[in-house]
Structure formats: C-alpha cells, structure tokens
Amino acid sequence: MNEITYDVVVIGGGPAGMAAALKAADAGASTAIVERNAQLGGILRQCIHPGFGLTYFKEELTGPEYAQRFIDRVEDSPIKVYLGSMVLSIHHDDESGTSDVVFMSETGMVTLTAHAVVLAMGCRERTRSEIKIPGSRPAGVFTAGLAQRYINIENLKPGSRFVILGSGDIGLIMARRLALEGFEVEGVYELMPYANGLHRNVKNCLEDFGIPLHLSTTVTRVIGKNRVEAVEVSQVDEQLHPIEGTQHTIPCDALLLSVGLIPENEVSAAAGVKLNPRTRGAVVDESLETTVPGIFSCGNVLHVHDLADNVTREAERAGAAAAAYAAGTLAATSESVPINAGGIASYVVPARLTRGEAAKLFFRVRRPVTRAHVRITVDGATALEGKPRSFIPSIMESFPLPAKLAAAAKESIEISVIEEDDDHE
Amino acid sequence: MIACDIAIIGGGIIGCAIARELSRYSPQTLVVEAANDIACGTTKANGGLIHSGYDPAPGTMKSKVNARGNKLYSAWSKELGFEFKRTGSMVLAFTQSDCAHLQTLLENGRANGVDGLEIIGPERIHELEPQASPDAIQALYCPHTGIVDPFDVAISAAENAAANGVEFLLNAPARSIEQQNDTFILHTPKGDISAKWLINAAGCYADVISDMAGGEHFEIGWRQGNLLVLDKNVTAKSIMPIYPVPTPTTKGVVVMGTVHGNILIGSTAIMREKGDLSCYAADIEELMAGATKLVPSLDVRSSIRQFAGGRAVITDTNDFFIGQSKLQHRLFQAAGIQSPGIASAPAIAEYMVECLRNAGVPLPQNPNFNPIRHAPEDFDIASIEHQDELIQGDPAWGRIVCRCETVPEAEIVAAIHRTPGATSVEGVKRRCRAGMGRCQSGFCQSRVVDILSRELGIAPARVLLENPGSEIVLGPVKGDD
C-alpha cells in the first residue's frame, strides 16, 4: 500500500474539485485530485446541452466544453490526478492535524496524507423510493440523470414514450433531449404549484417543444409487471396530498424522475463532519471549513447549486482557504457564531462564522414570492435590510455580510427573507 | 427430453434447501424454476427473520418445523457461508391485554420446545434495546431469534446443491404435467422433463402444481405485505428485532436491523390478488406508524426502498402442508410455506428427505457430497490489507461499480459466473449487493448492464432487470446494435 503526503487533497474531479485544486495549486500548495471515474469532468461529461459558462467565462458553453477548460488547466498544472480512484474513508488525526484519505484503485489501496482536504464529491439524485411512489417495480423507471447517461454516454435508448416527474432542471433538459431524439414526451408533472427549474429551461426545453407542464400533479402509481406500461397521475391539494377522483392513467414505457438532488456526504459524515439536516451538506464557516479542522467543502456536496458557474466560484474559495490552511496562513478560529435562516429562507451557507470575517451568505427561498426583502439580524437586532424584489426557489440567492457586522456579531446572525403584504405595494 | 429422478418444482428458499439436503444422496435431482433466477419470488421479498418458534399453535406443522429450523441455522450458516446473526428479539406489550398475549406466546413456545423465553419489564427491555419504546410495559424476550438475508440463504443452498450435482433449469414454468406409467412428464417452454418423483415447492403456485400432478386440491391465497428499508446510518446502532403483539394472521409490523446494517420495517398483511407485487400508500403509512410505535426515535423518512411480497397461504388451514401426497404417492408437497417459512426452511428440507425415505424413494449416499460452500469475497467488509491483496491479484477488484455498497467490478463478474449465476441486474444485486444502496442503482445500473452484456455475450438491449420482458434499454439511440 502506498502512502504519499500532499498539502491539499481534493476529493472529486468535477467542476468543484477541479476549481478548488487549481486555486490551491496556484497558491503554491502541493495538490492532488482523487476522482472515481476514468476521466475528469464529473457530471458535466453527460451534460451536452449549452448554458454553462455564461457568468464565469461570459460565453455560452456545453457541459463538456466547460469541463474541458478546467481539464486543460489541470493538465498544465503540477496537480497530481488519481483517476479511477474511489475514496472509501477519511480519518482526521487531531494530534498531527492531518487527515488520511484512503482510496481504492486498479493499482491497489492507497493512503494519502493531507494537511487539508477539500470535499467536492457532488450529489446524487433522489430516487423513486425516497419519494415513495406506490405501485409495481418494473424496468423503465429511471432518475433523469441515469437516463441522460444512457442516451448521451452509452448511446442506449431507455424508452420510447416518456412521462417525466419533477420540473427540476435535469428533468426539463431531459424533456428537450428526448424530444430532439424523436421520442415521445407525454408531459412533465410537478407536485408543487410552480416549476422547480430555471425559467430559461421551462421556456427553452418545454414551451419551445410543445411539451406540457402539469403543475400540482404527481405520479400516484406505477403500472406494469416487467416493464412500465403506464403511470397513474393525480392532482394534489394545498397540502400536496393526492385528490381522490382526479386519477388519470397515462400509457408510457418509461418514467423519468427529476425530484431533487442530495449531497453525497456519507464519507464526510463517517469522518466526523457535522451535516446540516436542511441542506444535507456540511456545516461550514465563512472559509468553507467544516466542523473538522482542515476539511473544507464546496460545490454540490455542500449545497445543491443552480449553475455550474456558481459551483466553480465557491470551489475556488474553498481551494484557496485549504491552501492557506495547509500553509498555516489561514486566520485562527475564535468563538463560533451561528448563522440561521429565517422567514421564507430555507437555509443559509455558511451556517456559522468562526473567524469574524466578511462573507457572502447563500440561501434559497421555500416558495416563489413576488415581493420580499432580505433582513440581516445580528445578536437579535436588525442590522441591514435589502431592497424589495421577487424571489424564486430555483435560484440560489446571495447577500453580503459586511466585515463590520461579521466582526461585531457575538451570539448569532440571522438572514431572513421577509415577504411583504400586497397592500404595501 | 430432460430426464431426472427427482424434480423439485420451485427454486425459492424451500426448493433450494430441499435440493441441498437431497444432494447428500445420489438420485439425479433437477430444480425447475419458472422465473429467470432462483430466490426471486417470496424468498426475495420478506424480512429475513429467523423466528424462534413460539408463535405457531402447538400441533401444527408450522410448530414442528419452525423451532427445529431455527436451531439448524447455526450449522447451515457455517457450512453454507451466509451471514446469520442470532440477535434475540422482543415482543412489546403496551396494554394489559397485550400482556395476556405474551403469556399465551410463552406457553405456546414452551409447548413447541422453545426454551429460554422470558417475560421482562421496562428496565430489562431498555437494557437489551435502548431504542425500544419507553411506553412498553412488558416484553417477551426470546434469545434465539436471528436474522439473515433470505435470498442469500437460498442462493448459498442452491450453489452448494449445484456443486454436489443438482441441476437447475430456469425460465421453465410447468405448463402441464402428464403421468406415464411411473413417470411424470413436465411440459415447459424449455422442453419436456421426465421425473420419477416430484416435489412441489412452487410457493404461491403450489395449488396449481398439485392439481396438475394429481395431488390434493387446496387453494393458496396471496397474503401480501409491503416492506420498507431504511438507509444505513453511520451513527445509529442496529436494532434487535422488535415485534408488536401478533394477530391470528400476522406477526405485525416488525422493526429489525439487517445483516448488512440497514433497518427494515415489515410487513403489512392483506389478502390481495395473486401476483400483486405493488406497494400501496396505505401500507407504507401503516409501516411507518407501526414502526414508530415500537421505536419512536426511528427516522422513517430515511427509507431507501419499498417492496412487496406475497405469502403463500393455504386458506383453509393457514398451516404448512408438507409430506407425501395421499392421492399421488410419487408427489411430495411443500405447500403453503408462508411465515415462518424462511426460519423453517432447513427443517422442512430435512423433514422432506425423511418423507421421501419413508415412502421408499431410494436414497443412496452421495460419496462426493461436500457440505461446505465458501462465501464469495466481499470487498466492502474485507480488511484493507486483504482489499489490497485482491486488487494486486486482479485489477478489476479496484474498479468501483456500486459506490453505495462498495462493490467492485470483479465481485459482479464473480456473481455472474457462479452456478447458478446472475443473469439479470436484480440477480447481480441479490448476489453482491450492487444497486442495493441509497442511490438504488442510479449510479451503477448502466455499468452493471454493461458488465452483464459483456460477460453473457448479449446486446445491452437484451439485459434484463429481472424476468423476460423487463429489458432496461430498448436498443441504441443511433446506429445498429
């Protein structure tokens, strides 16, 4: 078994991992990426649609093109890349302050000793079982990402007549992808009374292709012995419960699910990293450091992002912080101040300040609102309010926490999105 | 025409266990299974509890084989290399009338030869299982209850039987059975089979087979149950099986740890149309409510899988029917094997061999019989040194396929090439757990399809999820196969 030491070990070679590693290496840290696939790029490899890079590169790229820009940079850098390498565990040693990262690969079991670790493992898709769709369990039920892999990577056709449950971005993009290949897309069904994906995707992927979006409707039964033969859909009430009598059977041979993403944090949790039950990502501070010293987290393993560009930016901060930690130049931590989400904000990242430094607070709202504003409360007193505007859940929002407020906070900070009454307009 | 001495109809846990016991002797035995794999009917869809035998009414066939089966599990797991944990169990009582039930169970147990049963109070309950409900006022503690992966038991028994000379024929539902002189002729889509003796272990379809073979007429009902599996939790300990007080038709919603560290909740019990493998919203609600009553701290939302199975219930008697047919002396019945069928399986096999011997079926010893079947390598639970050794021997041990359960490519290839081996995605899952984890094969399914396609030499569009007709992909998006 090999044992090698690096300043920074990045777990995951997708957009987050590559950006973090590049920043760490730029800062002079000896850096390694451990990637389970045979290539870098992560999920971007199968995202052959455009829409990437608009903010980061100021031009529109496909997923593989966006990934390639970073792959080229990694190849030109001194970063050591371990491909086909699956991390099985991380052990942080309090005494030495380093972490051992153990992975399996074709060459054997390898242990890397890291002065700092960046978690960048991304997320997985929620399954049929997690949302407990009743009915039989035939072939033909796929998560949208798996169907995307079959079509875009494997050149295999997962069905011919599709029903899509969930209007997340992957579901919307897959609806268009299927239509482009000449498959039938019967419709997209969404439990909530609004679309969960970005507006641009509802327009470009559904409206332009004449694919109907059925809101407040869900799949209540899968039908078929060996292969999906049909699904039953039902309208739901305000409590999201199916309304008896609204059932409608739709013949199809495949059901795609785009019903949410879950940060893949099993290895992190086993390493002692505290998770936020709301995001299912790590609890991090303003440097993106988790509750385990020297272990940082970024990208979709921290919280599910809307755009790859935002993943890249966040990961760059994590990579820089990890390099500084390894070099001993990251500010020492002091008393931790929790940051809570309030009003209709469902979560906030970071969830605590440990260095009293300025931070950008990222959050999402629980439901769409036409007029609301952000309020920052420090130690129970309102410290800052944003301008009223509209908010939607599909967009990852951010709001700056100025240095002065961060330094002043003693007990707690809260970021709330306060809905304004119509009569205030 | 395929000729054999003894044909066992049904490759579930009962058919496989009988096949394994029969492989101690020389008659040529053939297991004839309707489905595409062994262990994929009721055997794959139950909790895997090795009940101790206090529940069946004394004098029933269930009472005869349950306690004995439970005892045999220690030796079976050692010989056959499957995981078996003797966890003990508790039946929780919340009311005075529940407590009276515990007393009845205790007396049943004693009559059935189950020793070590104890009625215990709240303090002992929490000592044994801290996660049990604090509202329980009494419990029946049984030290003998255990847990297994039921399909793992059947697969291990089948592999040992095969190694000792038993043949398996899959995708061969008996369409009709003819009797010529002293021989049965089974007509199946895989060809005709001649057998001198017939063992009916056809699960929920044992009534149909009995009628075809000229045996007793009985009706088998489908007492369907939904079950729910929770994610492995890195912090929570496994839970000792906890039962509520039973009703005449079911042991109720049980909470238990599994041998692989998940928590399982099962199962509901509702008579439904034969073959119905659907999950129902009302059943899932019942499971979650029942489980929370027994273990209030359980996070029932962390469910990664729901599934359903049907118990083969002889509706008249609600008992097992095991033995020589009185109408057709060359037919032997192992019918109505509902709960506690998994627990009883080794004893049913033993008893069946005795019935054959008593009926004069010649059973000379198999001189080459080897009772040992080694468990296949399991990368996930191997030491890091052994993991490294495996990879050094074959790099395919270092190529991850299922990341939730840490299953490398070599383990999947091995599962395909065992006898009887996996020929479907679900068959792979039952043999090495690829796809059994929290992502439910979202990550590994396409890779498993690829490996099956390569190893079986078939196009991806012919790779099945389970049975014929369950193709996963329909063909290439562009170009030819």
Image: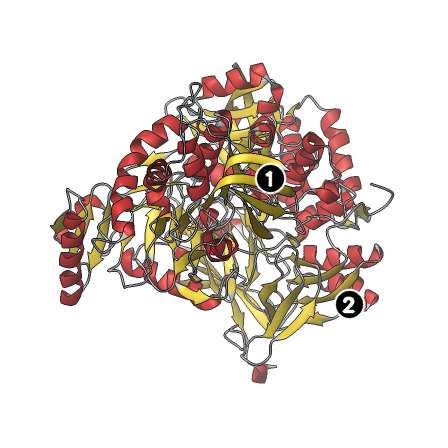
Q: Nearer the viewer, residue B22 or A397?
A: B22
Crowd around label 1: few <14 · some 14–19 · many ≥20 (10 Å): many
Q: In the rendered image, which residue does mark 1 sit on?
A: A317
Quote the CA–CA distance across marks 1 and 2. Answer: 40 Å
Task: Where is residue B145? Give x, y as percent.
Answer: 26, 43
Q: Nearer the viewer, residue B440 or A313?
A: B440
**Tag 2: amino acid:** Ile
Q: Eyeballing the image, is B261 above or below B273?
A: above
Label 1: state its secondary structure. helix
Depth check, mark 1 against mark 2: the one in front is 2
Q: Report the side of B174 relative to A227 (left or right).
A: left
Task: Where is residue B470? Give x, y as percent.
Answer: 66, 51
Q: Eyeballing the image, is A226 above or below A92?
A: below
Q: In the rendered image, which residue does mark 2 sit on?
A: A211
Q: Please name the residue shown 55% across and 23% down the image.
A: A7
Label 2: state its secondary structure. loop
Label 2: chain? A
Look at the image and tell me in which quarter the C terminus of chain B lies. top right
Q: Residue furthest bottom?
A: A423
Q: Report the side of A408 relative to B401 (left or right).
A: left
The answer to which quarter of the image holds residue B251 is bottom left
The answer to which quarter of the image holds residue B382 is top left
Crowd around label 2: few <14 · some 14–19 · many ≥20 (10 Å): some
The answer to which quarter of the image holds residue A182 is bottom right
Q: Cβ–Cβ below 8 Å for labels 1 and 2?
A: no
Q: Are marks 1 and 2 on the same chain?
A: yes
